[in-house]
Image (cartoon, coloured by chain):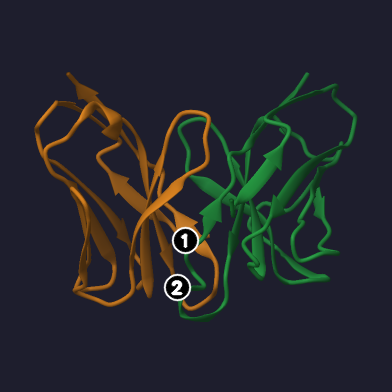
Chain colours: A green, B orange
Amino acid sequence: DGGITQSPKYLFRKEGQNVTLSCEQNLNHDAMYWYRQDPGQGLRLIYYSQIVNDFQKGDIAEGYSVSREKKESFPLTVTSAQKNPTAFYLCASSTGGGRSYEQYFGPGTRLTVT
Amino acid sequence: GQQLNQSPQSMFIQEGEDVSMNCTSSSIFNTWLWYKQDPGEGPVLLIALYKAGELTSNGRLTAQFGITRKDSFLNISASIPSDVGIYFCAGRTGANNLFFGTGTRLTVIP
């Protein structure tokens, strides 16, 4: 089955610790994205990558870091510098060409930092 | 980022009723997408619109790309309990990134 997987579904961390969220896709999509969703709010873009070994900051990149060493994988690290890390994190991917703007989402990871 | 105003914020309807929601922007968009999100899950793409005036259906769902390119509408006909969820619009300007509305929370009363 083609799709996007995020793991784990729930993640708990102590304040001051870095944590890495996994995102893998087997859709052969070139572009991948990370969003943050807070209760009652829309999705806000953290980072995106159009191609392997290249990524760009989104609207709320501060306190986050990413890497894109493989086409299939786009892990997100939430660093201790992120002031309000508790949120629902969504990974998405899209293909190139005329339909490149249709983003497909993974199931999300809910991160709780105490 | 861009501001997308989505309304209404929430709706409570009886099963079988039709539903309408919309999304407006102060900027011109080249693409409009509509997603549905179930609690604790990722959004699922429902409909994609690429041309001003375009009207596209997906089963009981119909969406339109507004003529001004600053708005989009989603209609659901004959609602059923599994339509419950949060519906998001998303729009794209000249760049590749999408901007999302704040969502319409739909509750269907059996």
> Which residue sits at x=18%, y=48%?
B60
The residue carrying pointer 1 sits among few (fewer than 14), some (14 to 19) or many (20 or more) residues within 10 Å by Cα, namely some
Element at badge 2?
loop
Of labels 2 and 1, earlier in sequence is 1
Q: Quadrant of residue A95?
A: bottom right
Q: Quadrant of residue B4?
A: bottom left
Write down the residue under mark 2.
B93
Q: Quadrant of the C terminus of chain A?
A: top right
Residue B102: which disc? none
Q: Is residue A8 left or right of residue A108?
A: right
Inspect the image, locate mark 1, and give the three-letter code of the amino acid beneath it. Gln
> Which residue sits at x=61%, y=38%?
A108
Tell which subunit mark 2 falls on.
B
Residue B54 in percent (x, y) is at 21, 72
Q: How many badges with numbers are in the image?
A: 2
Residue B2: which disc? 1
Q: Nearer the viewer, residue B28 or B85?
A: B85
Inspect the image, locate mark 2, and give the three-letter code of the amino acid beneath it. Thr
The residue carrying pointer 2 sits among few (fewer than 14), some (14 to 19) or many (20 or more) residues within 10 Å by Cα, namely some
Element at badge 1?
loop
